[in-house]
Amino acid sequence: MSKIEKLDGFVVITGASSGIGLELAKLAAKDGCDLLLVADRELGEAEAAARTGGAATVDILEADLSTASGLQSLMSAIGERQVDVLLANAGHGLGQAFLDQEWKDIAHVIHTNVTGTTWLLHQIGQRMRTANKGRILVTGSIAGHIPGAFQLVYNSTKSYIDYFCFGLRNELKESDVVITCLMPGVTDTEFFDRANLENTNVGKRDSKADPAKVAKDGYEALLEGEAHTVSGLMNKIQDAFAGIIPDTVLAQMHRKMAEPDK
């Protein structure tokens, strides 16, 4: 896929209120793009950062992309505009044992991470294919390659996202539409608080990755036209070993990270 020096045009960023999404917004603003920032939470910080960071224009939309109404509101906000770049970062996790979780919480993770992301890729991907141009960066995770005991739903949704991106990229390989998957590891964001994972070994870890570094890795991979990038050397090593270590062992290793303290 062709390399470009910077992003331009109309850029839609989901999950833009904090963490990796906020940092992606800053990078796109620096490139002088027209931005539509979307999240299910307050977007004041992201809007201010984008406006002061050099964005040509900034629109915001607070919408829950796990719902049909939220997704439709996003497409209404896009209107007839051609989306030049989609940074599909919306997603969240859920800690605790699967059978101890509430179904409504499980469903919200699935509908945000899988249903909403897939629907959005379908809608915007069709437009990009018709125009034969566009770039999409999807935030997956190295967790998608690990059986996620005590974080089971999240890891399973990210497995879907990671492999979906590879398959979609292959389907579009004869076009000028670029699909790139960003695969972070443990990153210092609001993820752990929202997922109720703060009382776990992974939640208490001091060596979480900087979301600005993770976002930059993904952004640069998209500019390069790469299929994917695993952010961070140790995450690259962990991801490589995940393909060798038996799944039963991986599940036990994950349990030690994600099981809440007694």
Image: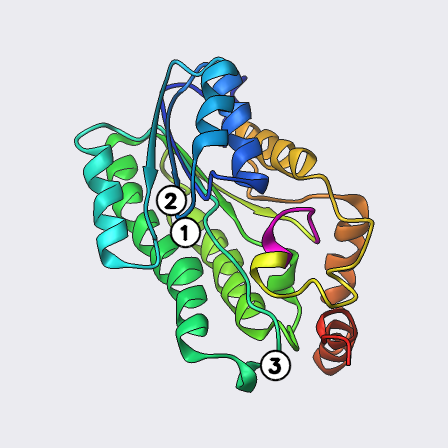
Answer with left or right where residue 28 lies relative to residue 231: left
Residue drawn at 66 percent across, 39 percent down: 211
Number of other residues with Cα within 10 Å of mark 2, as a class: few under 14, some 14 to 19, many 20 or more: some
The percent coordinates of residue 81 (x first, y second) are 22, 27
Quadrant (top left, top right, bottom left, bottom right) of the C terminus: bottom right
Residue 123 against residue 109 in the figure, above or below? above
Spatial separation of the CA atoms under disc 3 and disc 2 = 38 Å
Spatial separation of the CA atoms under disc 1 and disc 3 = 32 Å
Hey, what amino acid is under mark 1?
A: Leu
Hey, what amino acid is under mark 2?
A: Leu
Hey, what amino acid is under mark 3?
A: Ala
Q: How many marks?
A: 3
Marks 3 and 2, the one that precedes in the sequence? 3
Could you tell me which secondary element the residue under label 3 belongs to?
A: loop
Of residue 141 and residue 211, the one placed in the foreground of this image is: 211
The span picked out in magenta is 186-192
Mark 2 = which residue?
Answer: 172
Residue 258 shown in magenta = no
Could you tell me which secondary element the residue under label 1 belongs to?
A: helix
Number of other residues with Cα within 10 Å of mark 1, as a class: few under 14, some 14 to 19, many 20 or more: some
Residue drawn at 50 percent across, 65 percent down: 157
Which residue is situated farthest in the bottom direction here? 99
Mark 1 = which residue?
Answer: 168
Could you tell me which secondary element the residue under label 2 belongs to?
A: loop
Mark 3 = which residue?
Answer: 97
The percent coordinates of residue 126 (x first, y second) are 25, 43
The percent coordinates of residue 174 (x first, y second) are 38, 39
The percent coordinates of residue 120 (x first, y second) are 32, 49
- Residue 177 visible in the displayed image: no
The answer to whether the residue labelled 2 contacts the one labelled 1, judged by CB atoms less than 8 Å apart, is: yes
Residue drawn at 69 percent across, 46 percent down: 188
